Image: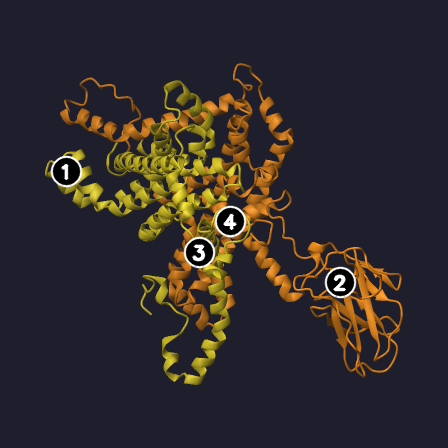
Chain colours: A orange, B yellow
Amino acid sequence: MALADASSVPAPPPGLDGPDPGRWRRRLTTAAFLAPAVVMLGVWVVYPTIRTIVRSLFGRDGSEWVGLGNYETLFTTDTLVTAIQNNAIWVAVVPALVAAIGMVFAVLTERISWKVGFRTAVFMPMAISMFAAGVIWHIMDEKDPERGAVNAAIGAIKDVFGSSGVLSRAQPSSDAITGSISEGFVLQATVRPGDGALLGLTAIPPAEVPEGAEQAATPQAAGGEIVGTVWRDFKPGGGEPGVVEAEELGIPGATVQLRDTSGDTVATTKTDADGSFAFTDVADGEYQVAVAPETFAAPFEGVSWLGPDLITPAVMIAYIWVWAGFAMVVIAAGLSAIPRDVLEAARTDGATEWQVFRRVTVPLLAPVLSVVFVTMIINVLKVFDIILSVAPGSSQDDANVIALAMWRTSFSGVNDFGLGSAIAVLLFVLVIPALALNIRRFKREES
Amino acid sequence: MASTAPIDAPTASPVPAPRVRTESRAAWVARQAARLPFQILMIIIALLWLVPTFGLLLTSLMPADQISEVGWWKLFAEPSMATLENYRAMFDNSDLVDALITTAIIAVGNTVLLVLVAALAGYAFAWLKFPGRDALFVVVIGLLVVPLQVALIPIFSLYNSTGLFDTELGLILFHVAFGLPFGIFLLRNFFAGIPKDILESARIDGASEARIFFRLILPLGLPAIASLAIFQFLWTWNDLIVALTFGRDVQPLTVAIFSQLRQFGSNIELIAPASFLSLAIPLAVFLAFQRYFVQGLLAGSVK
């Protein structure tokens, strides 16, 4: 389309074109349509951007010229360097994961009958604010497995694959028993079928005596049996070591090992509520009895997701939870635009489903994938709210990113507008490739 | 196969139609059984995406004295524990009620304003001829990705000197300006697709541009306008950084929750219901207008 010539300033061209009464009217109309947008973009976007670039060359209060001094500070201050490094990790990890998950979901949902339901579920977090999503995950990520769902799930899985111990610590009550928590406590005297073994333990705080413990009891061994008791060999006033007395409680749930003379474990069992245990059908011979180390396995205390070490992965999980739906929907739209006959042709030629996916679907999806990728890179560079809500104050320095650093430097009590501007400019510079990409794509489509 | 099959992908199930007839019932059962682990996997994934939000809802229903003691799943064991007390306490808290109203004013106000300004400009870019039009539009596209962080400091100073600081209007104007590049882009592209004949005949009939805009373009552009409005509504309802920077007493919900969060742990019985309320409304909007939301998303990204 032919553009009118360049003089965009509405100076009336005197006479030459001949009188055109509608011309001024048209220009005024156009101006009326455009003016609100142009003014707003100018005042709130374009002018501040330029102002910020200039401001970044001045000091904290704006009166002193510091040249590139703020940029030097930016790249040498610990928390700010952490922010840049973290953001680099974000860019390297999150867009790829989001695109991959979105791709997998988009392909998988083609194969279920309730795909609308599935997609709505995964897409739903897109409607939620980053901030609220962060609150949600803050609650999920609580360290205490009693309160944090993530750690509760991990704890439950751990319990399935190997239960945790009933005690965290103990000591032998007499010299008849040796060993340690990590090796187990071994009764030195050997036993034979028909014998009993007394495994007294002390140094167990009352609060750590397992629930349901009853008065300790000494069972009688039948033929071919080795029996015994694991108990808390202590009562108010002390009591006599190595003897089961009234008011002394059995240790239920303790793991007891039967070891042969070479030290190998030949059988294990667990104690009852009164601390008693029994090995039945034991072959004749000499054995030793031991309280196994499993008894003392520390209970699962929860992964410290919100602590300084794991905070960035924790925030990333929350962020991916939000954005996976976006990638899924965009990629699914791309998938549905691939002509079915192309895929059918490949299948007819004998390609396996994986080959069709790898050699036909993915190449045809490349433009869509690149859109997802670029969008996610821009989003990830600006990540902000979700960190404020997932990370508790104590680990925010460790979770720092550029956008958050910019805000904290400028407004959160520090109020260094010079350095804050420099951080904002860094952020701006980082999105310029995306900006150029957008413009190139637009020009290609228009021509 | 006809050349244009894929109207909508869903019907393309991997079951080839002709084979179904020859398949024995036993084979069908076997195939369904083989798919069972896959179905279960998909259900687990869907649950993974639903559970966190659901957990927030249940947390908000826990009695205040239990909330920092046990996890929300305890409600399954003891459903009678559930209570609306936290919500009642929240609505008794005038700060949070004010915050809810402020949020609504900002979100609705700026959405209406943005739609109007973006539609005017979108129409100009699509159908009015003026010098420098394409160059100006390229600038708009360039502004699409400008991070709002670059504007915070200068606008902070500007608002302080003009009295716009800590006002709803200041927040609204900032949101409109940063919503404009996407708004203009989306609406211009949609308006440009309106058939030329309709506009030409209206012009020949002597309709003014204003009349064409209000009587033709706005009604015809409604799908795109709906997309834009939903986006902007969600975006501003969910905003934290802008309100945190330019507001002090004027606090939307996110900021109000944020200030509670700074003492997290002691007052989760207030944070949980407030957070759930703050996400329930955009969620309802999203579920009601999901189609427009997805359309806008695709137009904005795939285009």
Q: Are marks 1 and 2 on the same chain?
A: no
What is the x, y in percent for residue A113? 39, 68
Residue labelled with disc 3: A122
Dot 2 crowding, Cα within 10 Å, few <14, some 14–19, many 20+: many
Looking at the image, which is closer to me, A264 or B72? B72
The answer to whether mark 4 and mark 1 are in CB contact below 8 A is: no
Residue B203: which numbered mark, if any?
1
The earlier-in-sequence mark between 3 and 2 is 3
Q: Amino acid at mark 4?
A: Ile
Q: Are marks 4 and 1 on the same chain?
A: yes
Q: In this rendering, would A56 be left or right of A19?
A: right
What is the x, y in percent for residue B124? 26, 35
Residue labelled with disc 2: A248
Q: Does any portion of residue A443 appear in the rendered image?
A: no
Residue labelled with disc 4: B67
In the displayed orientation, state which residue is furthest to the left. B205
Residue shown at 63% from the left, 63% from the top: A159
The subunit carrying tag 4 is B
Looking at the image, which is closer to me, B37 or B267? B267
> Whole-Å distance between the Cαs marked 3 and 2?
56 Å
Q: Are marks 3 and 1 on the same chain?
A: no
Residue A290: which numbered mark, if any?
none
Q: Amino acid at mark 2?
A: Glu
The earlier-in-sequence mark between 4 and 1 is 4
Q: Secondary structure at mark 1?
A: helix
Residue A78, image quadrant: top right
